[in-house]
Amino acid sequence: MDNRPIGLLDSGVGGLTVVKKVIQKLPNESTVFIGDNAHIPYGDKTNEEVIALTRRSVKFLLSKNVKLIIFACNTATAAAMDVIQDEIKPQIIGVIQSGSLAAARTTKNKKVAVVATNVTVASHAYKKEIRFRDPNIQVTELAAPKLVPLVENGADYESCLKAVQESLLSLKGKDFDTLVLGCTHYPIIRKEFAETVNKNVQIVDPADQVAQYTFNVMRRDGLFSDDSVKPVHAYYTTGDEKKVNKLGRSFLNDPSFVAKHIDSEKDNG
């Protein structure tokens, strides 16, 4: 038994899509989430900048004595996961590997589209991971940099739908049967994606597979908490906590959701 919390990080509120799935899959586990909203979006930064910012969030989570860390951010997974895993002892679980596995299992016609941030697309991380699992799968990668700021600012349905439609224009005419939401912000506007793509296209949210993989790792390593201990969920943000609280309460359907502000320019410990 290990009653330490699970740590999760993201560039903003998108990581709550992973938190939600992890809590559903592991209801006895405590969690600590840090969203680096002060520096969003990560997708337009250099790899070096993403690594430096992610390292700060990891340091904060380590100060909370977490037993493992989930990179609930595709950009951080693509740019920083391998580097930081070499620096710390707790295992890091990323979303790209899980999303790629789910995509490879889902596609029937061996054609997958991935919509993600600039950094994730430039890394070709999804293409490499999906084709590692099945070299016969054709992968189309598409960057959609307009979407994360809209989600972070709580834009209305019509604004998000228009932005999704514009972002996916280059996919018209391509006969992919699986669309991977390669940014954890995108499942928040999943309805807009479903409205835009062909009704026969399966939409993959990597968070589902992340939760299952986390369960498997914890079972393997004996990291489950004692079920007699009540789980605690703590949320932190480097940005505007009022904005984060509004989005968090709405998305998690939890009126008691409260994110505490931390100073991103100081040692987050």
Image (cartoon, helix red, strand yellow):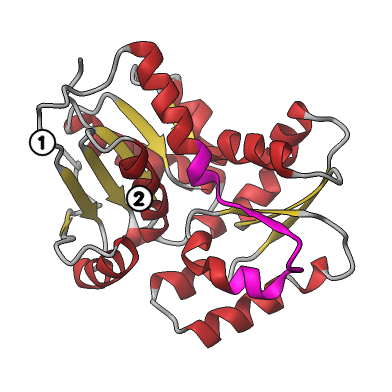
At a point 82% along the width and 55% down the height, the residue shown is 176
Rate crowding at label 2 as few (under 14), some (14 to 19) or many (20 or more) other CA atoms within 10 Å: some
Q: Nearer the viewer, residue 97 or 89?
A: 97
Question: Is 167 on the left-hand or right-hand side of 75?
Answer: right
Can you identify the residue that label 2 sits on? 20
Q: Please state the horizontal and vertical placement of residue 136, each as a whole percent of the image.
A: 88, 34
Q: Please state the horizontal and vertical placement of residue 77, each as a whole percent of the image.
A: 52, 39
Are the residues tagged 1 and 2 within 8 Å (C-beta)? Answer: no
Q: Quadrant of residue 118?
A: bottom right
Q: Give the amino acid type for the residue marked by disc 2 in the picture.
A: Lys
Q: Does residue 87 show up?
A: no
Give the residue furthest to the left.
229
Q: Nearer the viewer, residue 180 or 239?
A: 180
Q: Does residue 16 show up?
A: yes
Q: Secondary structure at mark 2?
A: helix
At a point 84% along the width and 39% down the height, the residue shown is 137
Q: Give the amino acid type for the residue marked by disc 1 in the picture.
A: Lys
Which stretch appears magenta? 192-209
Rate crowding at label 1 as few (under 14), some (14 to 19) or many (20 or more) other CA atoms within 10 Å: few
Q: Is residue 32 above or below residue 262?
A: above
Can you identify the residue that label 1 sits on? 230
Question: Is 31 on the left-hand or right-hand side of 13?
Answer: left
Q: Secondary structure at mark 1?
A: loop
Q: Quadrant of the C terminus?
A: top left
Give the residue furthest to the top.
221
At a point 10% along the width and 29% down the height, the residue shown is 229
Q: Quadrant of residue 260?
A: bottom left
